[in-house]
């Protein structure tokens, strides 16, 4: 994972990037495709904390998650497998530190986050013979957090 934060050109901009390649074979002799193995995955997240006085305490971010194609578990009756297509999901978040401008509200943070914001319809490999699961739909969550 690569995580860049507080660079010289933009001190409030940063976030992680995480590409991945997985080879499910355990030996050089392995030539079979592993069941339900996703070989390519990547994620990127960028966030920005506003340093300006007018919006001090505001932080926004967004990112992408990519999961490559894979195979559903083998059908034990026929020996066949179904290919499950890859997908890319868009996520975003925003938070506001209420204590940034009002010391009486120190450690109180209001946040909202959303996953799969484009409501992408996708499937993931299941656990049982020739099965897939429907991917998670769009979700938006809001929280109010206090640390003491």
Image (cartoon, helix red, strand yellow):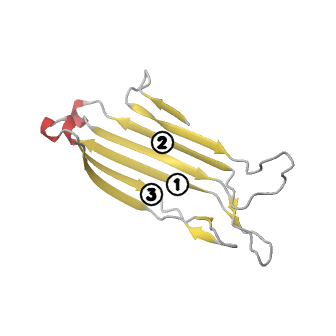
Percent of width and height locating residue 126: 62, 68
Quadrant of residue 50 within the rendered picture: top left
Q: In the displayed structure, does residue 9 sit left or right of residue 145?
A: right
In three-dimensional space, the C-alpha distance between marks 1 and 2, rounded to whole angstroms, equals 12 Å
Residue farthest left in this picture: 104
Give the residue at x 52% y 54%.
Answer: 89
Sequence order check: which comes first, mark 3 or mark 2?
A: 2
Assign a secondary structure to mark 1. Answer: strand
Question: 10 Å neighbourhood of mark 1: few (<14), some, or many (≥20)?
Answer: some
Mark seen at residue 74 = none
Sequence order check: which comes first, mark 3 or mark 1?
A: 1
Give the residue at x 19% y 38%.
Answer: 106
According to the picture, the residue beneath numbered tag 3 turns out to be 117
In three-dimensional space, the C-alpha distance between marks 3 and 2, rounded to whole angstroms, equals 14 Å
According to the picture, the residue beneath numbered tag 2 turns out to be 45
* Residue 127 drawn above or below residue 89: below
- Depth check: give the residue in front, 83 or 104: 104
Assign a secondary structure to mark 3. Answer: loop
According to the picture, the residue beneath numbered tag 1 turns out to be 89
Give the residue at x 67% y 54%.
Answer: 38
Give the residue at x 66% y 49%.
Answer: 40
- Depth check: give the residue in front, 51 or 22: 22
* Residue 135 drawn above or below residue 47: below
Q: In the displayed structure, does residue 26 sit left or right of residue 118?
A: right
Quadrant of residue 128 within the rendered picture: bottom right
Percent of width and height locating residue 116: 47, 58
Sequence order check: which comes first, mark 1 or mark 2?
A: 2
Percent of width and height locating residue 100: 21, 35
Percent of width and height locating residue 63: 48, 46
* Residue 87 drawn above or below residue 55: below
Quarter of the image for the N terminus: give it: top right
């Amino acid at each position: 994972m690569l995580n860049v934060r507080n660079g010289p050109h933009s001190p409030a901009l940063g976030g992680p990037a995480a590409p991945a390649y997985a080879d499910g074979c355990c030996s050089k002799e392995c030539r079979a495709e592993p069941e339900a193995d996703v070989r390519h995955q990547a994620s990127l997240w960028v966030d920005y904390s506003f340093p300006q006085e007018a919006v001090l305490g505001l932080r926004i971010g967004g990112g992408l998650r990519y999961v490559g194609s894979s195979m559903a578990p083998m059908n034990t009756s026929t020996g066949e497998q179904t290919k499950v297509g890859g997908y890319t999901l868009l996520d975003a978040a925003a938070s506001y530190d209420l204590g940034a401008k009002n010391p009486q509200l120190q450690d109180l943070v209001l946040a909202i986050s959303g996953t799969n914001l484009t409501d992408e319809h996708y499937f993931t490999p299941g656990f049982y013979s020739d099965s897939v699961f429907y991917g998670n739909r769009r979700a938006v969550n809001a929280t109010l957090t206090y640390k003491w």
